Image (tube, rainbow, N blue to C red):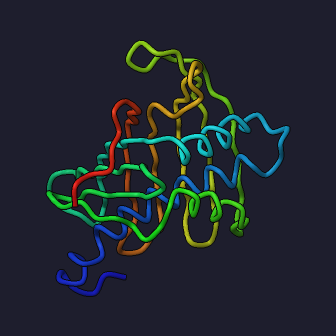
Amino acid sequence: MIRSLEQGRILRPTVASAAALLSAAFILSASARAADEPCQPVADTMKKMAATPTHIYSTTTAQWRTGAPRQTETIYAGGAIYTKVGASWMRSQLKPADMLDASSRDPQGRHSCRYLRDEAVNGEAAAVYSTHFEAQSGKIDTQIWVSKAKGLPLRQETDIDVGGAVGKSHRSERYEYVNVQPPKL
């Protein structure tokens, strides 16, 4: 629970970054439970993305945060993860491979995953999948658009509900793969 505004300022970027990594780990975990599940392509997609230079643009709205939605950027490049909150880039201690390792530990909870439909994202054909994870600590619902040509995510919409003071948040992400370089710190 956030006890003071000052603590909230310190925790908010961490919460936003952690939510992105947790969301990906839960998607991987839910879809990787059995190779014959209909969402195995989602697990394959997230594994491929972790090994591909990726620039993610995110917008997060949260129950605990007033004001404009928070804009963040994340870059996976050179075996590292970089996150930009506000005007500052930070290199994470986590690596893309850590996200994959987290997915191999089966969190306690209920998982489901299913194919929804085909849909274009900026003119590119994509398959849309839905994932759901629910545990005592909360629930995460995600829709992810996977490029049919590249097997990489193009877009993702995530709803997280952890209850309490933090409550609900929504995160919209778009993914780019052209000319991705580590940022200058």
Identity of the residue drawn at 59% across and 44% down: 46
Please provide percent x and percent y for residue 111: 70, 53
Of 47 and 155, the residue lying toward us:
47
Residue 2, image quadrant: bottom left
Residue 169 x/y as whole percent:
37, 56
Residue located farthest toward the top when viewing the structure as drawn: 123
Residue 11 vertical placement versus 56 (above, below): below
**Residue in the image at 37% along x and 43% along y:** 56
Q: Is residue 115 left or right of residue 80?
A: right
- Note whether 147 is above or below 32 in the view shown: above
Image quadrant containing the N terminus: bottom left
Residue 109 sits above or below residue 120 on the image: below
Query: Which residue is located at x 65 percent, y 51 percent?
Result: 28
Residue 127 drawn at (x, y percent) = 59, 24
- How many circles with numbers are drawn on the protein? 0
Q: Position of residue 24 (x, y in %)?
A: 54, 52
Q: Quadrant of residue 121?
A: top left
Relative placement, left or right, of 121 versus 111 is left
Q: Is residue 75 left or right of residue 158?
A: left
Asked whether 91 or 69 is in front, the reply is 91
**Residue at (28% x, 87% y) in the render:** 3
Give the residue furthest to the bottom.
3
The C terminus is located in which quarter? Answer: bottom left
